[in-house]
Image (tube, rainbow, N blue to C red):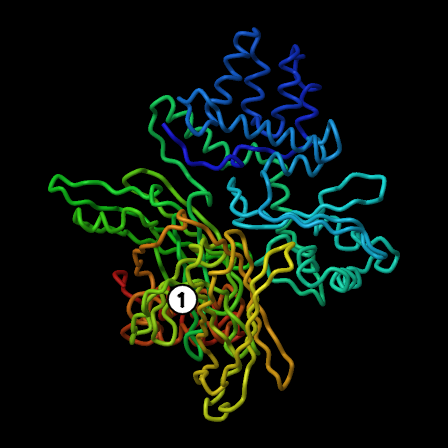
């Protein structure tokens, strides 16, 4: 029996384990050493309480054997690679992070918990800055983001490295001089000047995709949530659930279990579709072909059955609307042979209004009873904003599909693109790197903009490496549509690039005003394990962007963002005779009240209350 969970899922980072001995009956050596100095970042509170209840050494030995067995990738194998890797990390931490007790240092705790970072950069102290290290992690599992940074700094030359918190420490803690006391803006300015803009944004937010303004820095509370999950890694719900699943599989018990981003990934982008319509597109994909289960019918054909639930919440984390789809399909044996070595994904599209959202997607495989869930933050742009960019996403070389109805997921300007991911995408080595973005400028007649140019700069680099690839292009602003939108894409060669983790930056500059905007995304060049993708398409968006359901949901989004005028624009047509519904009139009434138009709100409520029950 083999399990696919990543090693890091079961590691823990916390200062709490060192206080256990004072709260429980004494444990004899060598078991005390095992508990407090070998597995304090790994053992859950439930396991710890059970261990303290044991009264014989025989029972403790059996507990330890089971403890490692449940974490093994192959419980039946005489070699426990999980245990070997765990002790290798302890030895490395002791050797590299402060001597015999390096395992107890902040760097040691992070390393033992999450393993070797994908990238690592050391920054020696300067005239103005303290000594720092920045580690970059990618897909560690355990309910953590797909990628993030961890920053360490030395408070003084005599002290060891300390884990840095953007919210609690703030950038000023990284400044060695007195130039930025109680002045975060000056601190970020100094860091930007000495170490560059990438480090400056990292000390504000550990999340590469979180919006950051280095001119007016607001340290990220979301970063502290990440650090909190690292500190209590052993007790995260994902870790506890995965351990329960492993125990049940060893014991032959069937469970329905929630699995995290070590198995699947969610890529989401927002687009402007017309002068007053916007969408959120997403791709929910599995990393490995083996993580998606098919079943065989009595006639020899194969099928899948999936339940897709999508939730869109506002900036206050309150649910705006929920969409559910049942996805099923039947395959011949020949078709199964064509997709056997491909990973599976689901594409979908949702209506939205300008603003900030939390997108949560939950996919349940009805055959295996496995539940995969992911959450992403999404920002939908305004319709009259200045120069801007969507999130970067990567696409396959499959030819685009004409979409005259403008209704498919990842369909922009009547062209359906085939996505393979965004952040954290794995690209086969030597394959062309096809990226796309939607560029935004203020609405204007294309004829009036013809001849004016925008400069597009692309850069591919690696953290800590001076090697980088750059390219510069220009765009005629007359190519934008009347709403100020343009789909831009480019194929970049990866032939000369070694396998590993990279970062792509796309920057758009207006040469006339020098206004610029940029987006960045991480990706990995991999070998044969970068599987091609096949997808199913969900139908949450329907066939028409301005359908009754889409306008209603867009109106709910505008209400959640506090934009009463836009909400009224969406919802007012739904109050017309023949199409009105109780829910639409109720939402329209709320929009009128938000706008201070009480008379119209009362009229909408009166019509709502007189609708027949069946409507």
Residue 601 seen in this snapshot: no
Q: Which residue is label 1 attached to?
A: 351
Q: Is residue 210 positioned above or below 605 on the image?
A: above
- Depth check, front residue: 73 or 469: 469
Residue 334 image point, x, y percent: 18, 49
**Screen quadrant of the N terminus:** top left
> Badge 1 local density, few (<14 within 10 Å), some, or many (20+)?
many
**Who's the residue at 48% across and 51% down the image?**
375
Q: Is residue 244 positioned above or below 432 on the image?
A: above
Residue 131 image point, x, y percent: 78, 49
Report the side of 530 relative to 379 (left or right). Answer: left
Report the side of 68 relative to 541 (left or right). Answer: right
- Depth check, front residue: 604 or 94: 94
Residue 170 seen in this snapshot: yes
Residue, far left: 299
**Who's the residue at 17% across and 46% down the image?**
333
**Who's the residue at 57% across and 26% down the image?**
43
- Depth check, front residue: 535 or 230: 535
Q: Secondary structure at mark 1?
A: strand
Residue 129 image point, x, y percent: 81, 54
């Amino acid at each position: 029996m083999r399990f696919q969970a990543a090693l890091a899922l079961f590691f823990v980072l916390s200062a709490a384990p060192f206080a256990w001995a004072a709260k429980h009956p004494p444990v004899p050596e060598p078991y005390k050493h095992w508990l407090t100095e070998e597995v304090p970042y790994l053992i859950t509170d439930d396991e710890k309480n059970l261990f303290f209840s044991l009264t014989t050494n025989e029972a403790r030995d059996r507990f330890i054997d089971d403890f490692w067995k449940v974490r093994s990738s192959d419980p039946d194998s005489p070699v426990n690679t999980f245990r070997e890797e765990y002790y290798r990390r302890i030895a490395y931490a002791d050797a590299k992070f402060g001597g015999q007790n390096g395992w107890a240092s902040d760097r040691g705790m992070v390393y033992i918990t999450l393993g070797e970072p994908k990238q690592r950069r050391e920054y020696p102290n300067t005239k103005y800055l303290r000594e720092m290290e920045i580690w970059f992690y990618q897909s560690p599992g355990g309910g953590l983001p797909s990628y993030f940074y961890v920053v360490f700094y030395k408070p003084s030359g005599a002290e060891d490295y300390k884990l840095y918190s953007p919210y609690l420490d703030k950038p000023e803690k990284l400044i060695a001089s007195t130039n930025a006391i109680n002045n975060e803006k000056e601190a970020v300015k100094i860091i930007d000047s000495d170490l560059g803009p990438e480090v400056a944004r990292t000390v504000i937010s550990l999340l590469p995709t979180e919006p950051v303004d280095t001119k007016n820095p607001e340290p990220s509370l979301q970063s502290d949530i990440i650090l909190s999950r690292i500190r209590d890694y052993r007790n995260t719900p994902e870790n506890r659930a995965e351990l329960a699943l492993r125990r049940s599989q060893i014991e032959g018990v069937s469970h329905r279990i929630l699995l995290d981003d070590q198995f699947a990934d969610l890529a989401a982008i927002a687009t402007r579709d017309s002068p007053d319509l916007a969408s959120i597109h997403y791709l929910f994909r599995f990393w490995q072909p083996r993580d998606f289960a098919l079943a065989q019918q009595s006639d020899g054909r194969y099928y899948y059955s999936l339940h897709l639930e999508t939730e869109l919440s506002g900036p206050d984390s309150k649910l705006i609307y929920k969409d559910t789809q049942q996805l099923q399909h039947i395959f011949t044996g020949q078709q199964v042979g064509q997709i056997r070595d491909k990973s599976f994904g689901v594409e979908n599209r949702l209506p939205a209004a300008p603003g900030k959202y939390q997108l949560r997607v939950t996919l349940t495989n009805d055959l295996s009873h496995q539940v995969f869930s992911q959450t992403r933050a999404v920002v939908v742009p305004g319709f009259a904003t200045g120069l801007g960019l969507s999130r970067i996403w990567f696409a396959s070389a499959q030819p685009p599909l004409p979409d005259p109805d403008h209704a498919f997921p990842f369909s922009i300007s009547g062209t359906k693109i085939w996505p393979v991911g965004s952040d954290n995408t794995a690209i086969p080595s030597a394959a062309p790197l096809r990226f796309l973005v939607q560029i935004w400028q203020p609405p204007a007649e294309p004829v009036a903009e013809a001849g004016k140019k925008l400069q597009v700069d692309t850069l591919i680099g690696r953290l800590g490496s001076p090697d980088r690839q750059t390219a510069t292009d220009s765009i005629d602003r007359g190519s934008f549509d009347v709403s100020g939108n343009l789909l831009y894409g480019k194929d970049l060669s990866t032939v000369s690039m070694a396998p590993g983790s990279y970062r792509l930056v796309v920057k758009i500059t207006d040469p006339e005003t020098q206004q610029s905007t940029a987006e960045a995304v991480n990706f990995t060049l991999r070998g044969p394990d970068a599987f091609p993708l096949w997808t199913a398409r969900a139908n949450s968006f329907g066939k028409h962007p301005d359908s009754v359901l889409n306008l209603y949901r867009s109106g709910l989004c505008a209400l959640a963002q506090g934009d009463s005028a836009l909400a009224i624009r969406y919802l007012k047509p739904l109050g017309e005779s023949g199409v009105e519904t109780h829910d639409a009139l109720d939402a329209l009434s709320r929009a009128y009240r938000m706008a201070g138009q009480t008379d119209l709100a009362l009229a909408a409520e009166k019509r709502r209350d007189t609708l027949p029950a069946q409507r």
